Image (cartoon, rainbow, N blue to C red):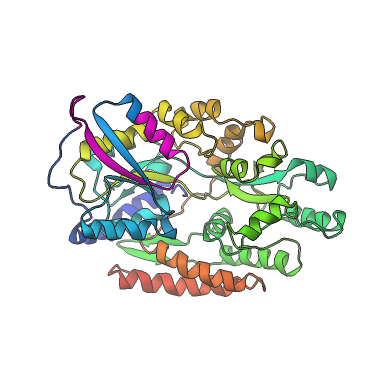
Amino acid sequence: MKPTSRTSAVALAAATASLALLATACGGSGTGTADTGTGTAAEPVEITYWSWQPGTKEMTEEFNRTHENIKVVHSEIPAGLNGGYDKLAKAVKAGNAPDVVNVEYQAIPDLVTQGLLRDSSAELGAAVKKTPESVRSLVTLGGKTWGAPYDVGPQSLYYRTDLFEEYGIEVPRTWDEFRTAAEKVKTASKGKARILDFWGDDVATWAGLAQQAGAHWYGTEGDAWKVNIADTSTRKVADYWKDLVTNDLVLNHKGWSPEATKAVTDAKAIALIGASWSAGSLKTTYPKQAGKWAQAPLPHWGTPATGAVGGTSFALTKDTEKAKAAAEFALWATTDAAAVKARLAAGTSSALPADESLRAAAKETFDTEYFGGQDLYAVASEQVPTITEGWTWSPVHNSTSLSLQNDLGKAMRTGEFWPAFQAAQTAAEKGITDRGLKLAE
């Protein structure tokens, strides 16, 4: 997800020295017991790759078509927190883990401390050093490289151009303007529509919004972790959305639910908060609305800024015995224009490459006719420098997310979101100490 600043990256490196030690104790920095190289055309090395990411099956097929010395077997798994990471943990324990797996940036510290990933400094480190520091820091812990970064996801606003015009709505630039627009949509539609379906239980959305407002949910102090989920910036965001929910100015369905999809299908919600990768899901989820959607920068609090949502890496698992072949595939997937084109050609993914040099290939490949030919990659790329700096993920964010999502879900009807963040503060602090890590006083 969110790229960290250089200052926070240095602090994180210091704090995660203890994480690296813990991971070693768990086997997380294992180097495997053998490495069969990258094979020959006559006897290619076969590696396994687990992913839930759109377009990765087609990307894998392109790799196999163009590489004779390595065969990659692609297996689809549930999304990370929907069961993918649990599946990985069980596979590592059972000794049948894949060689390569997609890992979201926010999950890397967690998986490292569980001992599920390989210290891939030798295989990926040199290439990762060539990526922007703000992204590189997300896959570097304790001075070691744990994955190859693929994309970055600046949070954005997607909206129905036809309905904004019908209701006389200007695209809001600030959150104050957004509230005014929300009132106007409700009035102009005679109560039939709302400006947005908020998805009040979606932790990733909240994290991006909090980040934009200046929050820093996690941080480091020396060799200890800090938790600051219940901070003033997050409180401001929680109160803002409470106001919109309690005044019936937005819909508030469970994220990714059939009800949320129906609200957009029926034009009861005419905008969505998403990220750079959301264009692909809009295109596939609402095919009959082609030509009616556009992307805009997320409204801000007075100064242009945004948070980041999503973003994944290609990581080698702890016990892979085919590290060279696995690394060759991971590096191709994250640095080769052919990989970008193969992944985006199906139109199911619109991921924004972290490597700026690959964005031209992405723009050339992803068909934006659905969005009226809008240059989505220009819009998203312009937002990357405005991503609020200083964001750090913790080794217990996955478990914290699950408890936070549950509490937010209970608050969706009332809009009383703030207590959920207070509870998450306590849960994260307990999670860090339970993991055997040091918590800052």
What residue is drawn where x is 78% and y is 41%? 162
| In the depicted structure, whether residue 4 falls above or below residue 47 | below
Residue 289 in which image quadrant: top right
Position of 81 with respect to 115 (left or right) is right
Q: Position of residue 292 (x, y in %)?
A: 73, 39
| In the depicted structure, whether residue 337 falls above or below residue 188 | above
Which residue is farthest left? Answer: 33
What residue is drawn where x is 20% and y is 31%? 38
What residue is drawn where x is 48% and y is 49%? 310
Residue 87 in which image quadrant: bottom left
Q: Position of residue 281 (x, y in %)?
A: 57, 44
Residue 43 colored in magenta in the image? yes
Near-viewer residue (232 or 412)? 412
Is any part of residue 230 visible from this angle? no
Count up the numbered dots.
0
Near-viewer residue (440 or 107)? 107
Near-viewer residue (36 or 112)? 36
Q: Position of residue 294 (x, y in %)?
A: 68, 39
Is any part of residue 188 visible from this angle? yes
What residue is drawn where x is 33% and y is 30%? 64
Q: Which residues are magenta?
A: 38-63
Position of 431 with respect to 208 (left or right) is left
Q: Position of residue 287 (x, y in %)?
A: 65, 41
From the image, which quarter does the C terminus lie in?
A: bottom left
